[in-house]
Image (cartoon, coloured by chain):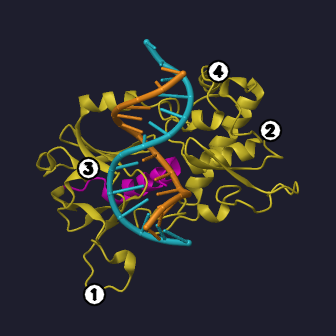
Chain colours: A yellow, B orange, C cyan
Amino acid sequence: MPELPEVETIRLQLSQLISGLKIKDIQIFQRKSFTGDEKLLIGANISGLRRFAKMLVMDTDKGLLLAVHLKMTGQLIYKKFKLQNSNNKKENLPNKYTRVIINFTDGSGLFFNDVRRFGWMRVVKKRDFEEIINKLGPDPTRINSGDFYKILKLSKKPIKLLLMDQEKLGGVGNIYVCEALFEAGLNPKIPANQLTEEASERLLVRLKKSLRKGIKWGGASDNNYLDAYGEQGEMQEHFLVYGREGEKCLNNCGSMVKKIRMGGRGTYFCSKCQK
DNA sequence: TTGGTTGTTCGTTC
DNA sequence: TGAACGAACAACCA
């Protein structure tokens, strides 16, 4: 799923690809996938891209923002030219899951594909945008250990569910929380406020490390994630526990990776290494 | 055919 | 007042 590293990968790529481009028109094939008046954005120049938790925001010179949330199956793929008769499936856009196309005046386009249709694009005024991001917790890549510990102390929730709570911490999803807890040697069920300050610090270090690793490998294409070039990420080849149910724990502890359900989500961990 | 899959929101329950 | 939990959303896949 697109989590922080996946969205950050797309942001870094799109910053290079579409900054400064002018929007020519916007084609909407699925009304549910686009909120607001797309005509307001015609003629607007993309001035930059920002990420808030798992949300991507395109700034424009018109005082309007285009916010995007990929949810579970969203893709944002940039194509420079309309290739004719291409055999490359990734170049074969639009496809049946293309919900929106942002066309730029130079002939290139940004394709918003989304199988499950949970994702959205939204035209937002700068002022209204504040309300949206005020609900999000701090970014785990930028938080310091003192503030992180304070957040943990305020909740009795299992640590895994707290880390995934977007109002407490913004951007962490199911994959990277499993990876980070494994690296930190912490059981996902521990109540957050029971972690010692030392464990909290260790967890934050490992969480940041897991997220950096995800960005380094261009995100995880465990399911249908593709980056802005339409390419798969490689992080799934470097998972330590996620999706490895029944396989040997990579710490060589002799135990096997277990899978349980927490908050309705698959949770992978080693019961021997994670106490 | 049915159940599993998942990020976020929403509604119900305690 | 609010924490906690489950369902809903949609479509695919095994």
| Disc nearest the viewer among 4 and 1 | 4
Q: Which residue is mark 4?
A: A153
Numbered label attached to residue A46: 3
Q: Which residues are magenta?
A: A1-22
Q: Which residue is mark 1?
A: A85
- Chain bearing mark 3: A
Where residue B11 sits, quadrant-wise, is top left
One can see residue A70 in this view: yes
Q: Position of residue A165 (x, y in %)?
A: 52, 34
To the question of a shared chain for discs 2 and 3, the answer is yes
| Disc nearest the viewer among 4 and 2 | 2
Indicate left or right for A101 with C12 as reference. Answer: left
The answer to the question of whether label 1 and label 2 lie on touching residues, with beta carbons closer than 8 A, is: no
What secondary structure do most residues of the magenta stretch adopt? Answer: helix
Q: Judge by depth and name the residue closer to the eye, A104 or A123.
A: A123
Q: CA distance from mark 1 to mark 2?
A: 55 Å
- Chain bearing mark 1: A
- Residue A20, magenta (yes or no): yes
Q: Of marks 4 and 1, which one's residue comes earlier in the chain? A: 1
Q: Which residue is mark 2?
A: A275
Mark 2 is on which residue type?
Lys
To the question of a shared chain for discs 4 and 2, the answer is yes
